[in-house]
Image (cartoon, grey):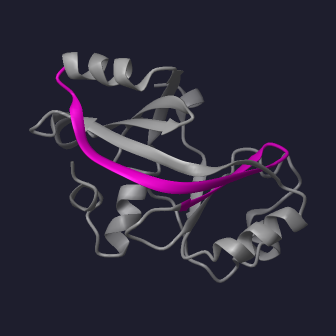
Amino acid sequence: MNTEYKEHEIKVLDVDIEQLVKKLEKIGAKKVYDDERTIIALDTPERMFLNKHDKLIRVTDEGSIKVTMHVNQSKPEIKEGIKFKTSRLKETMDFFHQLGLDPISKVKAKRISYELGKIDFDIDKFPAIPAFLEIDIEFIKEEGYELEQLLKELGLENNKVVVMGTEDIHNLYGKDYFDEYKM
């Protein structure tokens, strides 16, 4: 695959949402999203895509419908995401059903998103684990920041920083994402 699909993000665990929002606004970040999203993972009943091909297909309803295929799902350091938007959830789900892919999990999770220039910040709160911050670090230097400096400005210099997917973060807290939100 090519580099345009490469993930460039880190996750900062155990964040205090209220404090983080204040700090993001203090450094000039602009809120661009604040709502609950519905995230549906799709696979065959045997979990062929995830277990045999290391791919995860997600349909996220966040006002518009976003479809994502994560390639190399279990390897966050090389994971890639191919994304596109569609306008109709039912037709999207019917399309995947005809391919033999049906929901294996469904969760409603709160997301608050900010932008600071080209840096994206997403605060995610899933029901089963503490809130975490996802930072797209692709343009961090271009925007004049070093990661350590940015984390300090946000009061997160002592938080654990990881490069892993949401499912792996759940595992850190002793939760199996797909069991927790099983359909």
- The residue sitting at the bottom extreme is 158
Expressed as whole percent of the image width and height from the top left, the position of residue 172 reads 36, 73
On screen, residue 129 above or below 37: below
Residue 162 visible in rendering? yes
On screen, residue 163 above or below 51: below
Expressed as whole percent of the image width and height from the top left, the position of residue 138 reads 69, 45
Q: Residue at x 53, y 23 (%)?
A: 85
Of the pair 20 and 36, the residue shown nearer to us = 36
- The residue sitting at the left extreme is 46
Of the pair 62 and 129, the residue shown nearer to us = 62
Of the pair 180 and 43, the residue shown nearer to us = 180
Q: Residue at x 81, y 71 (%)?
A: 23
Q: Which residues are magenta?
A: 99-124
Position of 112 with respect to 125 (left or right) is right
Image-quadrant location for residue 13:
bottom right
Expressed as whole percent of the image width and height from the top left, the position of residue 150 reads 79, 66
On screen, residue 137 above or below 153: above
Q: How many marks?
A: 0
Image-quadrant location for residue 158:
bottom right
Is residue 57 a member of the stretch shown in magenta? no
Residue 149 visible in rendering? no
Expressed as whole percent of the image width and height from the top left, the position of residue 111 reads 58, 54
Image-quadrant location for residue 142:
top right
Position of 98 with respect to 85 (left or right) is left
Q: Residue at x 45, y 25 (%)?
A: 1
Is residue 118 a member of the stretch shown in magenta? yes
On screen, residue 114 above or below 44: below
Q: Residue at x 15, y 33 (%)?
A: 44
Position of 123 with respect to 131 (left or right) is right
Secondary structure character of the magenta stretch overall: strand
